[in-house]
Image (cartoon, rainbow, N blue to C red):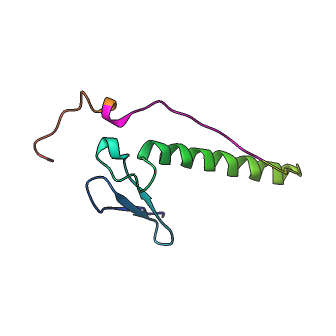
Amino acid sequence: MAAITAELLSDFRVDITNGTHTWRADEPVDLGGDNTGPNPYDMLLGALAACTTITLSMYAQRKGIDITSLSVEYSHDRVHASDCEDCEIDDRHG
């Protein structure tokens, strides 16, 4: 079973590990972060892009298709601050 651990280091800076690799997420300075890593939305899109690219590569290899280059691009217009404008805080959890 795969496990991911995320540890909050400062206001929004988070170190993430799978036990072998460690990477960082953060928010931009204008949202109160230190901009030391991509924001969670970009990380999610990066994971999707990596999965898509690897899947296409695996498919091509199994079909004997020679790929010399492969690139995928995703974009989003989500802004965390806007997404949370209507969020409610559950007093039981902070």
Task: Give the magenta range.
Answer: 70-81
Q: Is residue 88 above or below residue 51?
A: above
Where is residue 52, by image quadrant?
Answer: top right
Farthest residue, direction left = 91
Q: Residue at x 82, y 53 (%)?
A: 62
Q: Is residue 5 above or below residue 44?
A: below
Q: Residue at x 50, y 69 (%)?
A: 21
**Residue 81 appears left or right of 37:** left
Q: Nearer the viewer, residue 75 or 93?
A: 75
Q: Residue at x 45, y 42 (%)?
A: 41
Farthest residue, direction bottom = 20
Q: Nearer the viewer, residue 64 or 66?
A: 66
Residue 54 on image: x %, y %: 69, 52
Q: Residue at x 25, y 29 (%)?
A: 85
Secondary structure that dominates the magenta span: loop
Q: Is residue 51 above or below residue 20?
A: above
Residue 80 on image: x %, y %: 35, 36
Q: Nearer the viewer, residue 29 or 48?
A: 29
Residue 74 is one of the magenta-drawn residues: yes
Farthest residue, direction top = 86
**Residue 70 appears left or right of 90:** right
- How many marks overall? 0
**Residue 49 appears left or right of 91:** right
Residue 25 on image: x %, y %: 41, 54
Residue 53 on image: x %, y %: 69, 48
